[in-house]
Amino acid sequence: MATLKSYLSITKPGIIFGNLISVAAGFFLAAKSEPASLLLFLTTLAGVGLVIASGCVVNNIFDRDIDQKMARTQNRELAKGNINIDIAFVYALVMLLVGTAMLFQLANPLSAVVVLLGYVYYVFFYTMWYKRNSVYGTLVGSISGAVPPLVGYLAVTNFISLEAILLFTMFCLWQMPHSYAIAMFRMQDYRDAGIPVLPVKEGIHKAHRHMKAYVVAFSLVSLSLFLLGEAGFEYLAVAALVCFMWTKVTFRTIDDSNYLVWSKSVFKVSLLVVMGISGVLGFELLPAII
């Protein structure tokens, strides 16, 4: 019998939390130039969190066949058949509607429209199509993965600026080495499930070359936010530090004997990067709040 914990688990709380950090980054960046409030911040987190939770449930529903083949996911509630599929769909639909309505009513319609576009892109283009059929699935998924920080930004500004485009681009680029690192230390799972990620299809060395290029591009875009004048010197210092750390780790030489340890290091530093950038943007807002 499914429990409350079971229903919570299929929303993938870890993924929600990670995405809400990026939502905060977008919100904090926008709040440096536009008026914002704590209520709007909490509303935005809740609305985006519910939409992401809905997407994760739908992802679990459609991926239950491949989840059964992967050691990491074979004990998921839907893969084991512990939750009724129809109930899970209704559960996902309710969270989608509530989350979107919150953004529409309490933030602005633009943020609601963009979060819906990201949802449709994630569910239909990534989950149902590219993830299973193309080595470019990670790239397609990175676009939907960059929507949460953009929504955080738009909830404050209600318009798309150059800064918003750079923020979106930055998180698209961040997704790629982050996701490839996961694929590398879980390659056997992806092989078992028949998911054509780049490290499996083209090898670790080609994936390594791509990851280095993406990390450099991410570093350039993230530092360019400072040049626009909204992010301060604190941001510049932290962004430069975490980008240097990520570049240093990513550019290490790899081979068949060390790529597992290396990919886990790249993954861990990628989390530090997004937390550091989000944290310093929030820290820079403290004088205005206090």
Image (spheres, grey):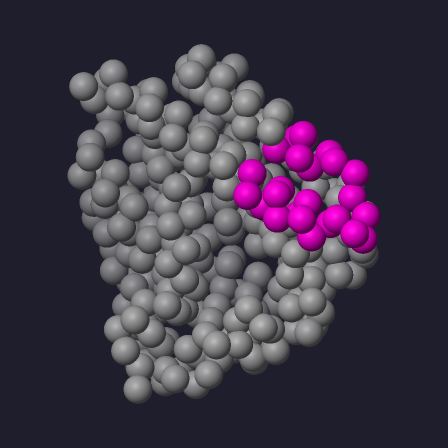
Q: Position of residue 155 (x, y in %)?
A: 31, 38
Q: Is residue 120 above or below residue 42?
A: below
Q: Please state which of residues 127 and 252 is positioned toward the viewer in this rendering.
A: 252
- On the image, which quarter does residue 247 sit in? top right
Q: Would you say residue 215 is visible in this rendering? A: yes
With 6 as the anchor, is 287 left or right in this view? left
Q: Main secondary structure of the magenta part?
A: helix
With 284 as the anchor, is 211 left or right in this view? right
Q: Please state which of residues 7 and 228 is positioned toward the viewer in this rendering.
A: 7
Q: Please state which of residues 64 and 192 is positioned toward the viewer in this rendering.
A: 192
Q: Position of residue 45 (x, y in %)?
A: 29, 46
The residue located at (28%, 78%) in the rendering is: 3
Check the picture and name the quadrant holding the N terminus: bottom left
Q: Position of residue 191 (x, y in %)?
A: 71, 69
* Residue 31 part of the magenta segment: no
Q: Is residue 289 above or below residue 139?
A: above
With 235 as the anchor, is 39 left or right in this view? left
- On the image, which quarter does residue 44 sit in? top left
Q: Please state which of residues 127 and 121 is positioned toward the viewer in this rendering.
A: 127
With 103 as the anchor, is 137 left or right in this view? right
The residue located at (52%, 15%) in the rendering is: 227
* Residue 265 part of the magenta segment: yes
Q: Position of residue 33 (x, y in %)?
A: 33, 20
Check the picture and name the quadrant holding the C terminus: top left
Segment colored magenta:
246-269
The residue located at (34%, 20%) in the rendering is: 284
